[in-house]
Image (cartoon, rainbow, N blue to C red):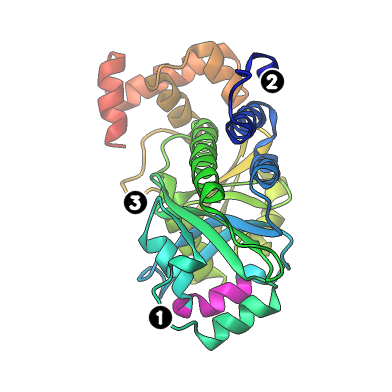
């Protein structure tokens, strides 16, 4: 349909970009959450050819002792890539430049001439066949982390052109928007938890998203944890959801709940304990956000009658008599 209505005089590059955005939007509507980023990167690869790619979430200098990748996906790279990068992130000038220039596309040619490449980074790049690099890092709203996409070409191929740089940057911004909207929809199934203390995983334990606070808590509880997959003790608890799990020597209480085809993992709030049970709080939060009894029932796997019971209980427990008062009370819960 898009090809049929495209203006005959449109430049081929513009047509290719337009079609890639249409494909991306279609995947955002139809693909399973765990498949979206991988499929999006294949669409990008057809638009801006690359040999290898890496994407995911990263924290910057000063957080947890320095830059760190928390979870990732990749094309054409070894399984050890992210772990190796975490070991040298503090001396990776290109990575730090991308994190410092949020929202801008950075190529290896953008590195200041007076900043020599660190020997460890040079060896890492040679080991993985990385030469021509292009990356964009942007804030992932409310998570405390940044979302990044990096693509690479080997020495025998040409570097990324200015036109490819523009296409890459615009495509990644669209991808980030779709990804954030998808996370918002999924997070609404487990409301009441801040984004930075919330994570989403497949039933197998593969992570799709994790906020900074919960990532740091898991990293502290399991020092060998490398991200992208929940630590083994948490994975072992997944068949028992919904359930609670206490991790770490400084006890951290996690709540594991179904979230559509996924599992939501959340930390206890920093605030005082809510007077509502988790399901009552979920129903009240969804209702406060304008969801109908029927929608809430479908989201939480309850009957509409049970939803109405939960809402009556919430009104009584919070001492409110209308939705406006409910919204105000929930903000303090």
Q: From the viewer's perspective, tell me whether residue 164 is left or right of residue 321.
A: right
Cα separation between marks 1 and 2: 46 Å
Question: Relative to 331, is 102 above or below?
Answer: below
Q: How many marks?
A: 3
Which of pointers 2 and 3 lies earlier in the amino acid sequence? 2
Report if residue 306 lies within the magenta region: no
The picture places residue 133, in percent across and down from the top left corner, at: 57, 64
Q: Please give the range of residues in magenta.
A: 83-91
The picture places residue 19, in percent across and down from the top left corner, at: 64, 29
Cα separation between marks 2 and 3: 52 Å
- Give the residue pinned by disc 2: 3
The picture places residue 66, in percent across and down from the top left corner, at: 41, 73
- Give the residue pinned by disc 3: 270
Pair 1/3: label in front: 1
Sort mark 3 into few (<14), some (14-19) or many (20+) by Cα contacts within 10 Å: few
- Give the residue pinned by disc 1: 115
Q: Residue at x 66, y 30 (%)?
A: 23
| Residue located farthest toward the bottom when viewing the structure as drawn | 119
Q: Secondary structure at mark 3?
A: loop
Which of pointers 1 and 3 lies earlier in the amino acid sequence? 1
Report if residue 85 lies within the magenta region: yes
| For the residues bearing labels 1 and 2, Cβ distance under 8 angstroms | no
């Amino acid at each position: 349909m898009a090809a049929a209505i495209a203006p005959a005089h449109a430049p081929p590059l513009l047509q290719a970009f337009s079609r890639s955005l249409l494909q991306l939007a279609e995947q955002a509507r139809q693909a399973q959450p765990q498949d979206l980023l991988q499929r999006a990167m294949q669409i990008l690869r057809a638009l801006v050819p690359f040999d290898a790619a890496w994407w995911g979430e990263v924290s910057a200098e000063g957080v947890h002792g320095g830059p760190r990748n928390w979870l990732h996906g990749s094309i054409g790279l070894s399984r050890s890539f992210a772990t190796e990068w975490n070991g040298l992130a503090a001396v990776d000038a290109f990575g730090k430049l991308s994190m410092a220039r949020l929202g801008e596309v950075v190529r290896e040619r953008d590195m200041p001439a007076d900043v020599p490449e660190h020997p460890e980074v040079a060896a890492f790049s040679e080991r993985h066949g990385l030469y021509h690099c292009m990356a964009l890092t942007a804030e992932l709203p409310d998570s405390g982390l940044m979302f990044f996409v990096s693509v690479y070409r080997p020495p025998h191929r040409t570097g990324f052109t200015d036109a490819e740089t523009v296409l890459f940057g615009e495509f990644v911004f669209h991808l980030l928007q779709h990804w954030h909207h998808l996370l918002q929809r999924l997070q609404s199934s487990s409301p009441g938890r801040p984004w930075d203390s919330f994570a989403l995983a497949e039933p197998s334990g593969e992570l799709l998203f994790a906020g900074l606070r919960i990532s740091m808590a898991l990293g502290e509880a399991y020092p060998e944890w490398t991200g992208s997959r929940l630590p083994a003790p948490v994975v072992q608890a997944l068949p028992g959801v919904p359930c609670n799990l206490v991790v770490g020597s400084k006890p951290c209480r996690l709540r594991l709940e179904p979230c559509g085809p996924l599992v939501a993992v959340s930390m206890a709030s920093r605030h005082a304990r809510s007077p509502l049970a988790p399901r009552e709080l979920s129903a009240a939060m969804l209702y406060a956000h304008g969801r109908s009894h029927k929608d809430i029932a479908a989201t939480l796997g309850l009957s509409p009658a049970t939803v109405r019971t939960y809402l009556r209980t919430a009104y009584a427990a919070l001492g409110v008599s209308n939705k406006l008062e409910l919204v105000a009370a929930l903000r303090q819960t």
